[in-house]
Amino acid sequence: MTHTADPAGTPCRIHESFFRWARSHAAKPALVDERGSISYGELAGAVEATAQRLRDAGVRAGDRVLLVGENCVALAVCILAASRIDAWSATVNARLSPREIDHFLAHSGARRALYFSAASEPAKAHGEQHGAQAVEWPGIGELLLGPLNEQARPEPVEHDPAKQVATMVYTSGTTGAPKAVMLTHANLLFVAANTCRMRDLRPDDAIYGVLPLSHVYGLASVLGGALIGGAALHLVARYQPAALARALVEDGISVMHGAPAMYAKLLEWSAVSGTPLRAPRLRVAQSGGAPLTLPLKQAFEKTFGLPLHNGYGMSEASPSICQTRLDAPRADCSVGPAIPGIEVKLHRAEESPEGVGELWVRGPNVMKGYYRAPELTAETVTPDGWLRTGDLATCEADGAIAIVGRSKELIIRSGFNVYPVEVEQVLNAHPAVVQSAVVGRAVEGNEEVVAFVEPVQGAAIDLGALQAWLKANLSAYKLPSEIVVLDHLPAAATGKVLRKELQRMAARRADGDKPDFASEARVVG
């Protein structure tokens, strides 16, 4: 089935998002990685050629194609090429374990898997393990093509972009079991256009693209927003503070997206190495994917002389729900009002504190559902279209939303509610702490607060001083029962801290398992 943009020029498939720039700015760089770049004019040809190669490899409309890799031009082109033939792309990070890749292959029923070996050694290893063969594809170079899955059955193809799935995003969510979020072309295009408009993206922008394309933030907001805005997207496989510092100067990065941990490690690298940070063209810095703390926001803004904007979303919302506005930067860590075109409301449970409720969202950003999980979809999206986010929030008089935590991460200690983000704000304000994460741990008849902290590189944490700092800034029932110092907090490729891993670690420590790499303080709250 062939699709073209409507007469007004509005794209109805994600591969059409850049067509206007292919015509008017054909020579301008569209995608850049460490191996080279591709212009907007070349991108159109590369997508068409790659789409034909997918057809030649037996991929049909409605088939799923598993893309295993790390950020690179070839990966972005293949995502767009899958759209061109109405196949569903499912991009997964090559740094995942073989067990996880096997699960995604089986669950998706992928017709083919592509492994982007030129940009990722782990992708090469996965491909070789699955019997993939090296293939040279015009415009994007060599990759490994997995065996044809003869048992794969295509899904129905819908002309309506609000019904046709463009991609599946695998997420563990709050349950720990991987789920495949089905996002339509309309979902992704809505968020991409919103990002372009709200961050005023334009052809003279250079955007830093280190957030993985396997994550919906990197896919919809970063890649999609860049293509709709005609900007140059610099795709980076792995985050390194020194590389970002260099790109800000030498590549003229003007728009930067990242999780709070990325900004924290950039500032830490600068302080430890004694290298001043310069960003002569930077005009937009956006934080998302995890809670932003006030000390980090203030440190960033002091260093760069511009606001660190905040946002909030989730995979099931493609991902954008709230964003601060360029013309109204905030001094606090609110995630701003809801983005234009959607509805939000706070759903209050009887036991909820005054003003706090679970954030619900409805609009064109809400997913089609979870693949092969109708019961789970029904639990998450109400019959009238409200997405239950599972996040607890408050709403200010001006409509700005503040996320106070996940409903399942709320710690109830001696009958009092403890929101992890509040304790983390205080921990992160300590000069020896880069970042922290707070989890609850069940004890007989109660819950206790456990804090994990990552120290500034080369610094030693004085646990007694940190305990005194917490006592001076928190109520007694919010004080951690245990503080664990780790060299690095476990994190996903996006920089988002893996809280479930910390919860398991906290439980193991209660059973007497205390690894050599951690130090601790027992604090009576």
Image (tube, grey):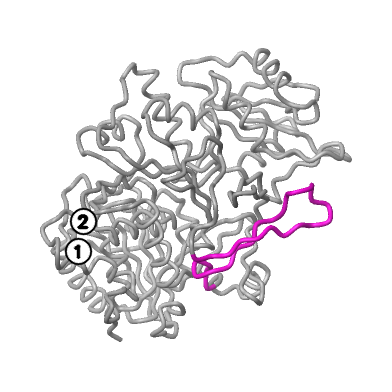
Q: Residues within 10 Å of mark 2 (few under 14, many from 20)?
A: many
The location of residue 52, given as percent across then percent down, is: 21, 76
Quickly name the residue at label 1.
21
User: Of the residues shown, which amino acid type is indicated by label 1?
Assistant: Trp
Q: Nearer the viewer, mark 2 or mark 1?
A: 1
| Residue 349 among magenta residues | yes
What main secondary structure does the magenta stretch of the protein show? loop
Report if residue 109 lies within the magenta region: no
Which corner quadrant of the image does residue 404 belong to?
top right
Q: Secondary structure at mark 1?
A: helix
| Quadrant of the drawing holding the C terminus | top right
Looking at numbered disc 2 in the image, what kind of residue is underneath it? Ala
Residue at the limit of the structure toward the right, as seen here: 445
Q: Which residue is mark 2?
A: 30
Q: Position of residue 288 (x, y in %)?
A: 48, 46
Q: Is residue 451 left or right of residue 169?
A: right
Indicate which disc, 2 or 1, sits on the residue closer to the N terminus: 1
Q: Nearer the viewer, residue 124 or 6?
A: 6
Question: For the magenta stretch, what is the residue range?
Answer: 341-368
Residue 391 against residue 434 in the figure, above or below: below
Task: Kindly indicate whether the residue at mark 1 contacts the one at mark 2 (C-beta within 8 angstroms).
Answer: yes
Q: Residue at x 73, y 20 (%)?
A: 471
